Every structure is written in C-alpha cells, then in structure tokens.
C-alpha cells in the first residue's frame, strides 16, 4: 500500500522554501550563518507556514527607513535618494520572488520609525515627515505594489510629535535599568548598543565639546534609542500580530527577528539612510559615506536633486 503524505508536509515545505529564499539576504554577524537552513529559524518558519496553510499572502514587517542622517558628510540631504530607491525596489522584488514559489506572494509593511526617536538623533520632525512622504511617493510612482508605509501618524493621528513620542515611551518602552542589565549580560544586545552609539557619534556634525563628552552623551542617548525602538516593535506587533518580523540590524540565527540586507555595504550595520549610493563601473551598487563616495565618483542628479555617485 503506498505511503500517504502528511497533511502539513506541503505547507511546511513551501514555508521552508520561502524562508530559504530570505536566507540568501540574511543580515547577521554570526559565524557560519551561510550554512544555516530554514529549520534553524523556527519563529519565522512557523509564521510563514501559517500563511501558507491559509493560502494568504505572507505578511512581512520591516522597521526602518526612519530619516536621513543629520551629518552632511554621510548623506546627500534629508530626502530619500538612490539608496532608498534601490532598497525599496529590492524589497518589492523579493516579494515577487516569493510569489514564484508561492502564488499568493508576500506583502511588506515598511514601519518608518523616525518620529519615534527623532529628538534623540537630532533630526527635525518636518524632515522626518518629508522623508516618509517621499517614501510613499516613490512606492506609488515606481509601482511597488507589494510595499506600504506605516508610521506614528497612522497610530496617533495629528497629536504633536513630542506627545506621540511620550505616549510610545510611557506605554511601551522597557525600564532603563533592565535594559542596562540586558546589555551587560547579552552579547548581541551589547553589539546593538555599541552599533547605535557609534552611529550617534558619527551622525553628530556640530558638536563643540570634547570627544569624550560626545561619547558619554551618545552612550546615554543610545539607551533611549533602544528603549523607543523596543516600544515601536511592541506597537508593530500589536497592529500586525501575525507578520514575520524583519530587521535592518544584524540578528543571530534563530532569533525572533530576521535581519535582512538591503544593499551591498562595507559592514553589516550600514544602511541607505546613513550613506550614499555609489555605482561601480560594472554597474553594481554599494553604499559609502558621502565624503568617501565623492572621492571615488562624480555626483549624479535625478528629479532635480542629488541622487548618487558614479564611478568611472
């Protein structure tokens, strides 16, 4: 008598195939991650498989795309440029590729978090609004139908920005003492803390005090950024409870969040909003600080604004 296939075999194998596709873009600092398979990511496999069983599009959320760095040595301005265009196109294409494995495909919500910690990173709220509005415009203009943008305006409407931040922090942020204890005890939490501290130091363009004073101030603000990022993550989970949670930060193998690389970059922490896009002579792209990209290539414009650099 022939063996019958278990009812869950097909959804689970399809879910594993989708996850293996995501794995080709996994962002992590773990050694040997390139040998990891879908079975090493039970959180993501379980959620993806649940969508497959229903025949529903896989829902993905990606916190990020907050705003441009305030340091003009790193970026071309306060609006999205080629770095964001390439990243959004990549994410929409990734959803399309999932559709080739699984016809209902995938939908991704870009959870733009600039307003959550704009005061801590020194970016004006009007620049953050303009950045998020331009993201929506790019998605519409380029026909990236599998993407959408979600931010604090979708949650708290027209409240003043400082009131929105206070609401998020007071209702959802972890206690500072608990976060400090976690950072001391957990290597991945410490790496995130150090990475954010480094970005805050690099993004401070107008500091008039000593270097040591700047580092002390940025270490303190880094905890605030992590507190509010955690709070934002809780809010996303409340409003998108079944979604597969992606992250632009490196994540360990098997973590509840799945780190994903957007573009080629010199390290696992570089993002389009902390850098400029540089087109190499062979047509491939990478990210680099504006000052470095300007040394390597010539500035190109698009839609009347600086867009990227091109290497001859």
Image: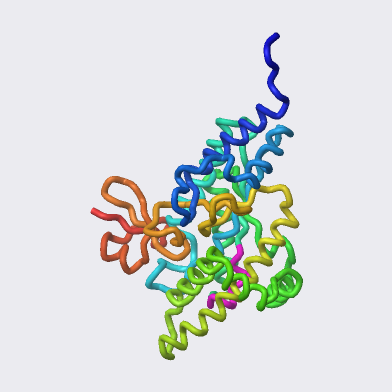
Q: Which residue is located at x 46 percent, y 42 percent?
A: 35
In front of the other: 180 or 219: 180
- 208 is higher (above) or lower (below) than 33: below
- Residue 286 is inside the magenta segment: no
Quarter of the rendering containing residue 182: bottom right
In this figure, what is the number of numbered marks? 0
| Residue that protrudes farthest toward the bottom in the picture | 209
- 160 is higher (above) or lower (below) than 207: above
- 21 is higher (above) or lower (below) than 272: above
Query: Is the image coloured rainbow, by chain, by secondary structure, or in one colour?
Result: rainbow
Residue 214: % across, % down: 46, 85
Does the magenta stretch mainly form a helix, a strand or a loop?
A: helix
Residue 168: % across, % down: 71, 70
The magenta segment:
113-122
Q: Which residue is located at x 42 percent, y 89 percent?
A: 208
Residue 125 is at least partly visible in this image: no
Screen quadrant of the N terminus: top right
Residue 176 is at least partly visible in this image: yes
| Residue that protrudes farthest toward the left in the picture | 312
Residue 191: % across, % down: 50, 66
Left or right of 202? Residue 97 is right
Q: Which residue is located at x 69 percent, y 58 percent?
A: 236
Residue 224: % across, % down: 61, 76
Quarter of the rendering containing residue 6: top right
């Amino acid at each position: 008598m022939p063996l019958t296939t278990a009812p869950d075999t097909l959804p689970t194998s399809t879910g594993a195939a989708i996850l293996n596709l995501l794995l080709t873009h996994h962002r992590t600092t773990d050694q040997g991650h390139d040998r990891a398979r879908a079975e090493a990511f039970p959180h993501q496999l379980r959620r993806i498989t649940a969508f497959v069983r229903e025949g529903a599009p896989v829902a993905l959320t990606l916190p990020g795309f907050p705003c441009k760095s305030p340091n003009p040595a790193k970026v071309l301005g306060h609006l999205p440029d080629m770095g964001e265009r390439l990243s959004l196109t990549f994410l929409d294409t990734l959803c399309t590729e999932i559709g080739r494995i699984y016809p209902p495909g995938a939908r991704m919500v870009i959870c733009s978090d600039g307003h959550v910690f704009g005061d801590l990173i020194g970016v004006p709220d009007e620049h953050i609004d303009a950045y998020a509005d331009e993201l929506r415009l790019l998605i519409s203009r380029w026909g990236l139908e599998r993407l959408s943008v979600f931010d604090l305006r979708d949650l708290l409407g027209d409240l003043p920005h400082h009131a929105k931040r206070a609401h998020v922090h007071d209702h959802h942020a972890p206690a500072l003492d608990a976060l400090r204890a976690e950072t001391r005890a957990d290597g991945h939490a410490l790496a995130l803390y150090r990475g954010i501290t480094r970005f805050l130091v690099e993004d401070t363009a107008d500091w008039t005090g000593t270097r040591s004073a700047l580092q002390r101030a940025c270490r303190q603000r880094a905890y605030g950024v992590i507190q509010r990022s955690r709070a934002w993550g809780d809010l996303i989970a409340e409003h998108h409870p079944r979604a597969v949670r992606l992250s632009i930060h490196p994540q360990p193998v098997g973590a509840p969040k799945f780190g994903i690389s957007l573009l080629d970059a010199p390290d696992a922490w570089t993002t389009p909003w902390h850098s400029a896009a540089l087109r190499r002579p062979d047509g491939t792209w990478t990210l680099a600080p504006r000052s470095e990209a300007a040394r390597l290539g010539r500035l190109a414009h698009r839609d009347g604004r600086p867009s990227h650099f091109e290497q001859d």
